[in-house]
Image (spheres, grey):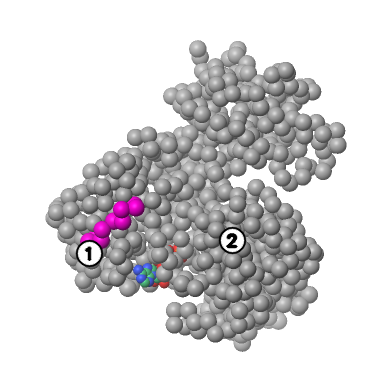
Amino acid sequence: MSRIRTHNTENQIALDLGDDTATTAPAPDPGTPAVDNSGLLASLAQTDALLQQWQQAQWLRPLDVGFARLIRALSEEQGEPPQPLVLLLAALVSHQVGRGHVCIDLTSLLADAGSTLSLPPEEPARPSLSDADAAELSQLKPGDLLSRTTLADCQAALTGSLAVSDGSLTSPLVLNGSRLYLRRFWRYEQRIADGIRQRLALPSPLADPESAPARTLSHALDQLFNSSESVDYQKLACALAARNRFAVITGGPGTGKTTTVVNLLAALQAVAGQDPARAGRKYRIRLAAPTGKAAARLNESIGGAVSRLPLSDLPGSVQLADIPTKVTTLHRLLGSRPDTRKFRHHRDNPLLVDILVIDEASMVDVDLMASVFDALPANAQLILLGDKDQLASVDAGAVLGELCQRALKAHYTPTTAQWLAAITGDPVPDSLVDPDGQAMDQAVAMLRKSYRFQQDSGIRALAEAVNTNALDSAMLRQIRQAEFDDVIWLNGHTPRPDPEQTLQQICQHAITGTPDAFRNAGQGRVVNNEPLAPPVGYRHYLEQMNNHDLTSGSPREHWDALAARVLAAFNDFHILCALRKGPWGVEGLNDRVARQLLAQKLIPRADGWYPGRPVLVTGNDYNLGLMNGDIGITFSLPWDKTATDEPKDTLRVAFPSGDSTGGIRWISPSRLQQLETVYAMTVHKSQGSEFNHTCLVLPDRLSPVLTKELVYTGITRAKNWFSLITGDAQVFRDSVGQQVVRASGLALRLGEH
Ligand SMILES: Nc1ncnc2c1ncn2[C@@H]1O[C@H](COP(=O)(O)OP(=O)(O)OP(=O)(O)O)[C@@H](O)[C@H]1O
């Protein structure tokens, strides 16, 4: 039987899923959707009509329907029209990729189509839909259509289709057991799995604990760690990661991921320095993060950690210059080019690197992770750092989460446990040993102790309660009654508050940070032996902005220093939302907060460009050196005066330089293309950031985006103060009960070998 092939590349047929206009397949005549007696769609035309209706109701994207049509057109071109079920599944797998899944798991789909697909969505259908159409839609949900379909039916229809293969052919769809993929995503997953497996199979020169390199490692770790704990998980993570060409170090906020990786790099350089075969040549190390913001944050923390290294105590004459402190974005590292998702570095032009460390790896999607593996030399070491419990990447995949699925119990084999004990001197707890541990388990280390938060920290206790599904009435009472020093639930006593009043309360909170609501009005806290200022709101940075005596004659450095202070002050408070749209979302709250700031005369206007406007960059701009996620603040500067004119103020947006110099880039608003005002941002966008005081706003209705991971990520963005405001108290509790489960086959593939 002949199979559908792509014309030139596999991507052509798999469509560019970022581009809604990518398909040209015509829309066949819509008939009236109907189901036959078996509950299945009777014809291709009816299937198409149904998909079109779902598109009209915004249940599906035009891209999803376009993809199904393309499958039909290509099959018909080859004289074998597909079954209606194949078209339906094609549209649904495309829909799932749009929701962050790498594939669709047919077993879950058939067991509970409604929640697997999140269809119908909880948001109301488009208002333009007529009552009759809406009524019809309500009868034809994917769950109803598939209620009498079995996995065997799906597999038979798919394997009988020209558009589907097991991956050995360049068909647009790939079926692997019960998982159906768009081919492009199947390839990403395969490239990642191959890259990991190949690295895990490489022999390690450290495998024999009695060998010279292993003894050097052990000696270096002893110098780097001097914990009195019975098991030092940081030291254990270093040893494990040193042994493998691929390793993952996961841990919650402040568990010492940065500290651990700096020690690891120092230990590896010590081993390299002692290795006669390398003749003193140290490893070429690069540090990267998925966003500019995450890279900047690591830049800030890594310098300090490197400067504290006891280098003179280490073997191998490790120098400060051997440990990098500059962090770049992954896109920059790989060499992104405008208008293509192909990078400059790939298999045929690999990166010149021996060790690559990626921080905030939970934000890396399958597409980017596959590109990382492509660009790495085969024997280069890859170390992923991140918090497995955070939200997964915005785009498809949850690579870090999947790799860390078994991290809690570790599953180290007795061999690994003995090796770790020999190298670190600490016995591995029995609870972490499993004779049936898989190869991947031997490369994952979890940090288990938070050093950033004090024992009595409410932020830490609340984050842990959310993460472990232990949000009990005692915890709710504690945050309602401000029993912790650092956490408040501003309207926690009101189960269903008046929406308008709550939105006003959010705006007021945004201005002052409501210090009085915190225990002791936020006074008297000491953190790291330093007194901590009470929590603030946005008034704080706006006052900093106006509180200066600079003039048009002031040197540029003074303006830079002012901008740096204002940007730092802006980091002292932030509102995070679960949603983008609506009054509880970023769009509604940005508008409201701006109007409130205007009403209080803290800003001169509430729309367009004005001094004080904070902006979030929403796309990479390599010409300007700005990355998606960068935050800048608009200033009015007296710089453009000419000799004869009156001084004329000019608006410029100040952005941190993004390197470790702490410099400022001043950019004219007219040059900025992709941005939005950022008094409020989504929790998704806030990943990789940290704010002194974080306010999490949850809406008045539950929706599928409100999950445990979202709430946990929101809470852990708070460094010293956390406030919660809810449109409905129950929504907070219910959100924590919902979990993100992203369909993917990566863990399975790695477990198979
Ligand atoms: N073993 C340790 N003993 C004492 N303090 C430590 C230890 N490890 C880390 N710290 C301190 O804890 C704080 C957090 O450490 P670090 O920045 O390495 O954690 P992280 O996991 O990278 O944090 P984040 O969640 O911000 O990414 C730092 O102040 C660091 O100096």
Horizontal side of 351 relative to 419 (left or right) equals right
Return the residue at label 2. Answer: 472
Quarter holding the C terminus is top left
- Give the vertical position of 566 relative to 475 (above or below): below
What number is the disc on residue 220?
A: 1
Q: Which image quarter: residue 472?
A: bottom right
x and y percentages locating residue 599 in the rendered image: 78, 75
Front-most of 553 and 685? Answer: 685
Residue plotted at (46% across, 34% down)? 187
Mark 2 residue CB less than 8 A from any atom of ligand 1: no
What number is the disc on residue 254?
A: none
CA gap between label 1 and label 2 equals 44 Å
Q: Quadrant of ligand 1?
A: bottom left
The amino acid at mark 1 is Ala
Q: What element carries label 2?
A: loop
Residue plotted at (64% across, 73% down)? 481
